[in-house]
Amino acid sequence: MAVRTARLAVDTSNVGSQKTIYTCPAGKTAILKDVRVYADGGAATRVILYLIRSGGAPYSALMDEDLPNQDTRAWQGFIVLEPGDHITFQSTGNAARAWLSGAELDGVTP
């Protein structure tokens, strides 16, 4: 049986600009299930994770929060990503780290 749950991304934010940390691969459907963001840059920071549809279509913020230094925020749920959809990460003030978990399934929904 195939493994369905995976670490989708682990990355550090750019300060002041968006950085793509995950893109759903061609021929796959991804399900984002869990996000953890940790502020460890020595001071408080604001973290923003955006969901961006394939082709750069309008995006929405998955997480937009102020974090004290050495604090963690979590998001859990189910968000379906189609090929080319991606998640970007940025912070203001200091860098932060993000861990995204979920599943990549073969095939694309019609």
Image (cartoon, rainbow, N blue to C red):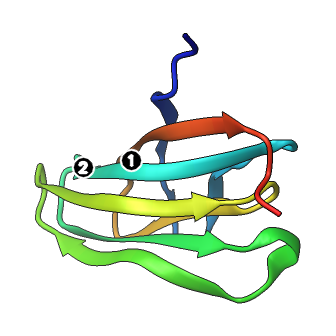
Which quarter of the image is occupied by the C terminus? bottom right
N-term-proximal mark, 2 vs 1: 2
Pointer 2: residues within 10 angstroms few (<14), some, or many (20+)? many
Residue 25 appears in the picture as rendered: no
Q: Dot 1, crowdedness within 10 Å: few (<14), some or many (≥20)?
A: many
Residue at 47% x, 81% y is 61
Which one is nearer the viewer's eye here, 25 or 21? 25
Q: Could you tell me if residue 58 is visible in this image?
A: yes
Residue 98 marker? 1
Q: Secondary structure at mark 1?
A: strand
The N terminus: image quadrant? top right
**Residue 93 in the image: above or below residue 28:** below
- Residue 18 position, x and y percent, is 62, 68
Percent position (x, y) of residue 89? 52, 62
Which of the labelled discs sits on residue 38, or is there none? 2
Identify the residue at horizontal 38%, vertical 50% (top origin).
Answer: 33
Q: Which disc is residue 68 wearing?
A: none
Asked if the residue under mark 1 is in contact with the one under mark 2, i.e. CB atoms within 8 Å, the reply is: yes
Q: Of the residues shown, which amino acid type is indicated by label 1?
A: Ala
Q: Quadrant of residue 93?
A: bottom left
